[in-house]
Image: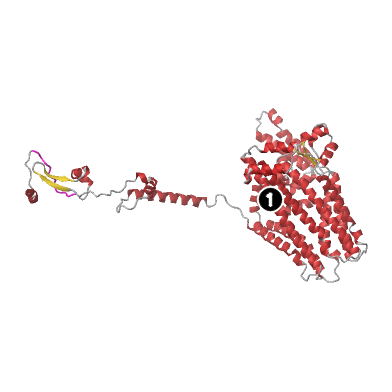
Amino acid sequence: MRFDIAFFLCCCRSFLSSSGRDDGESFYDLLGVTPKATQDELKRAYKKQSLLMHPDKLAQRGQSITDADRDRFTRMRHAYEVLSDPRRRETYDAIGERGMKWVEEPLSVDPQELAHNFATSSMVDRSKIFAIFLGIYIAVFLLPILVCLMADGTLGEGVKWVTVLTPLWVWDFFILFYHSRVILMGPIKRPDHIPEEEWVDPLPMRKRVMAMIRFACLVLFQVLLALRLDHYIAPPWSIVFIPMYVWDAIALRRKIMIAGMMIVTQEELELAVGKKMADCTAAERENIHRRYIVVPAKVGSIFDSACRLREEAKMDIVRILARVTFTILLVLNLDLGKDWSWWLVFLPIFAMAGCIVGSAFGNFSRTQGDAVKKDPALFGMDPSTVNNDEEQGGSYSKMDENSKQGSTEPLSEEEQAELKTKVAQSAYRAVGTCFSQCSFILIMCVIIAKIEGASYSSLVIISPFLAAGGIVLCCLACTIFCISEVDENAGMADFDTAVNQAQAAATGYNSMDSEKPNTNGNYTPPTQQNQQSDIPESDVAAPETNSKPPPSSIWDPERGEVWQNTTVDEEEEPSAPEEDANVSSDPIIEENPSMTSITSSQCDLD
């Protein structure tokens, strides 16, 4: 088995299906051969299956052709293409059709499928992934730990620097192997969706060779430094640092080219060149891409990315110059025996950090100023004040005047949101740069103090990184071993039952409230309370201030007993005995005009 396949299986077995194979029909079954079939057997099987599956052959036999028949024939032809290639066949035999597709087309990976496979994977496969992260942690921090122990003299006097730097040699070997593979893999194939006249190799051979030479210079410097520290060789330190000078010179040349590139649109470029990009040769297009940065328009995210690319190149130039100056001071202090203070030798490093922070805040200030010019009110400023400040700054060119006139137009909500996002991102970058450079300066101060003779251990210098790496490793362990598959339908039956019970209880409660009499006159059901709470206060009848006198009766010889101070309902109340449960059941004597009036004494006797 090839090394890359074995590594893929070790790292990504948990992301494949639990069975490790595809659920559908295999390529060998489609062709009707065994997995041990030779190339001749595959050819004969392909011709035979083509005669059986080809849509034209099916039509000649009078069969109706369906989409399933076409898809099956297409898949059979793809199976033959894979199995006829020995390298792809080996990949297919090891990881199946789905795994081979992931290797050849990483962008076709379905994240949900990966998450499902990982959640259902075994602990053995997860342990392999954690072992890889643990190995990376050890490989990253083993070298600094050994260097600190060697600098403190903990490893003993007989230990050589060549032995201590063994992890570094291993890293160099793998990186050199990677560069050699990149050079040997040949030109990058053009994607199908890009026309041939517009295709430019993003990694030409010249770049690959220069990257290999640059890294070789770094490896040569490491070897010379280890041999010089172990006293195997005794050249001046200026000779030892020659590979570093070459390494910085190559990087400086590249960064100067990027910093000097012009940002133009395609229309401006075609106007300057005198012909369209499609008519240019491959060499001319490569030369154009080395001198210009072509953007769709001089506004938008692509233009901002191009501007940031140039700014980062300028900062890299500052870093390289500071590093070269520091190297020169270091070599003079070592070769000439100058007893300079190490704080002076490291002064270019401090100046570099200050320049980087100043540049970051300068970019933020320019971004904010451009945003304020476009929409001052968005940032809480008076437009008239901004215009007066601009006029006091001097005269403008015609382009600046046009941009100023265009900026008076109101911006849409999307443009305002984009403007705010741009300013916020610039602020985040400035704050992040300031924090990182302050941390870098603090570490450099600790290193310089140790060189000057401080009594603390060298492990103090790398202790923050060790702690941060340990925290990240613990979080990865919890993520890897604690993830489990979640059933989307789990608990839905219990949830539906609880909802139904709650609805039934609410329905029964409302029916009971509607049938329950209001005995005390104080309680009202929730629905009635809500209705009463919605009634405005103006509609509520105010209580009567003057109490009505109690009812009284007088005797009329013609009409008999007549009641006064009564309402119509109270006068008609005796005629409706079914509405009052407390009315007496005695017979009611109605007044009859044909009868004589009954005296009060007779009523009493009755």
Q: Mark 1 points at which residue?
A: 427
Viewer-side residue, 89 vs 15: 15
Q: In this view, does 371 lie to the left or right of 197?
A: left
- 446 and 402: which is toward the camera: 402
User: Which percent across, then down, holds residue 273?
Assistant: 83, 34
* Image location (x, y in percent) of residue 446: 77, 65
Q: Looking at the image, which residue is at 75% across and 53% down?
A: 358
Circle 1 packing at 10 Å, graded few (<14), some (14-19), many (20+), is some
Residue 216 in the figure: left or right of residue 53: right
- Residue type at mark 1: give it: Ala
Magenta segment, which residues?
Answer: 583-593
Residue 13 vs 412, above or below: the answer is below
Q: Residue at x 7, y 47 (%)?
A: 599
Q: Is residue 297 within the magenta segment? A: no
Q: From where the camera sits, is residue 85 visible?
A: yes
Location of residue 549 in the rendering, given as x and y in whole percent from the top left corner: 20, 49
Q: Is 565 placed left or right of 43 in the picture?
A: left
Magenta segment's dominant SS is loop
